[in-house]
Amino acid sequence: MFQFVREFLVQLFVKMHFPENAGKFFAALIILAGFIVVALVLYQLIYLLFRIIVKWRLRKKENAWLRAMLEQRFFGRFALMLPSFFIFRLIPSFFVFKSASFFFFLALAGIYQIVAICLMLCAFVDSFMQVMSGRDSLKGKPVKSYSQIFKIIFWTIGTILIICIIVNKSPGGLLAGIGAFSAVLLLVFQDTITGFVQSVQLSSNHLVKVGDWISCEEAYGIVEEVHLVGVKVRNFDNTLISVPVGRLVKGTFQNWRDVLSKNMRRVYRAIPIDVNTIQPCTAEMLQEFSHIHLVKDYVAAQQKKLDAQQPDAQWLNQNVVTNLDVFRIYVENYLRNHPGTHPDGLLMVRQLDPEENGLPLQIYCFTKTIVWKEYEDLQSEYLNHVVAAMPAFHLRAFQRSSDHPSISGKEF
């Protein structure tokens, strides 16, 4: 139909004293440029029409699928594919059937169509991932890993088809030849295959998901994405790091997911007590401690036990309460009544094994907040109060020093 256009261009170049082959070549280039212009015009018109229709539909009623496909440029990729069908219809009109130019332009149109279809399918996968990521049942799942697998499959098939077009062979024959090359392909894609298997393990075993707080040798922060071969973590210093999936599957890491879900974080600190200040409580000391509200009931119970004992017996042969016992009960009651302590968490104040630095008194409880600064403020408040309250119980924290200051005006 339009072959006269090609003939006219060839004759025009011949009249301009171009060789006939050069004239055919430049005529083909001009037709190619015309095809590109037609494809671009059609693409812009179709894409504009899609955008108008979709935005009008979204104004009428919100639709998650339409919104996702619009944001992921699915309609743009779809509009990019449609002109290829029109170009396929134009090629026989410009070139002689089964001529070299005919097959050349047919191959270019085929490659263009395959690339456009792959782009469209990848945009659809991204739209699907965006919709699925918003669902509660799939939140935190490594959906992106699966989408990357589909993209690899699409582009692998597309590449095979493009090679078939270039070498003018059927896909079956090419795949048969690739079968002998499969060992090399497995070697090339071994990281991708291994990463996919390991990402499935992370997902199925619920080891890591988006939003988890993890800590390992490489990272300490919040998981933002789970990729095919890596996990992207935003550290608390706002740096980004990608941890290989295999490192998490095979190695050791901490997942603080339950800390975030239960909104409680552990305080696990110990203060060394100077053993030289630990002593049995006398009647005068118990009378002094009875004025402290948090241990008033405990001191009263100990006073009754002391009154029931024989007054002339040595204290080594009787049940003895020390100032450290009273202080431990005081710290435990202080933590239990503190507004920042979580009531559902385990709470205890215990003594650890004696060391050269004294007898460690350990605080073990959980705070109501997991916010870093608030947690550190509460932890500091606990420790500062405990250290400041020691002199009231005739105790002293161990410190490497030759000179010990007085405690409440007394020397020990």
Image (cartoon, helix red, strand yellow):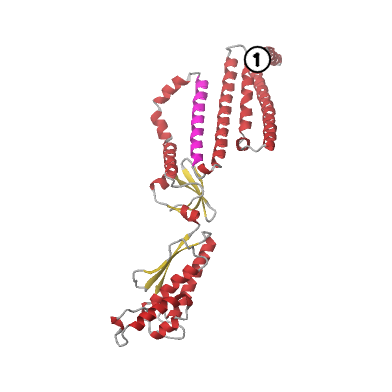
Q: Nearer the viewer, residue 220 or 183?
A: 220
Residue 19, picture quadrant: top right
Q: Nearer the viewer, residue 29 or 124?
A: 124
As for residue 157 lying within the magenta part, the answer is yes
Total labels: the figure holds: 1
Residue 277 appears anywhere in the view: no
Above or below residue 205? Residue 149 is: above
Above or below residue 93? Residue 189 is: below
What residue is shown with label 1? 94
Q: Percent x, y for residue 313?
A: 29, 85
Residue 242 appears anywhere in the view: yes
Q: Percent x, y for residue 28?
A: 64, 18
Q: Percent x, y for residue 395?
A: 41, 79
Describe the element under mark 1 as helix, strand or loop. helix
| Relative to 128, 186 lies left or right | left
Q: Residue at x 58, y 25 (%)?
A: 112
| Relative to 129, 66 lies left or right | right
Above or below residue 343? Residue 385 is: below
Q: Percent x, y for residue 119?
A: 57, 31
Query: Crowding at label 1, few (<14), some or many (≥20) Cα neighbours within 10 Å?
Result: some
As for residue 352 lying within the magenta part, the answer is no
Q: Main SS of the magenta segment?
A: helix
Q: Residue at x 68, y 12 (%)?
A: 1
Query: In the image, what residue type sits under mark 1?
Result: Phe
User: What residue range appears in magenta?
Assistant: 142-167
Identify the image quadrant of the C terminus.
Answer: bottom left
Q: Residue at x 64, y 20 (%)?
A: 86
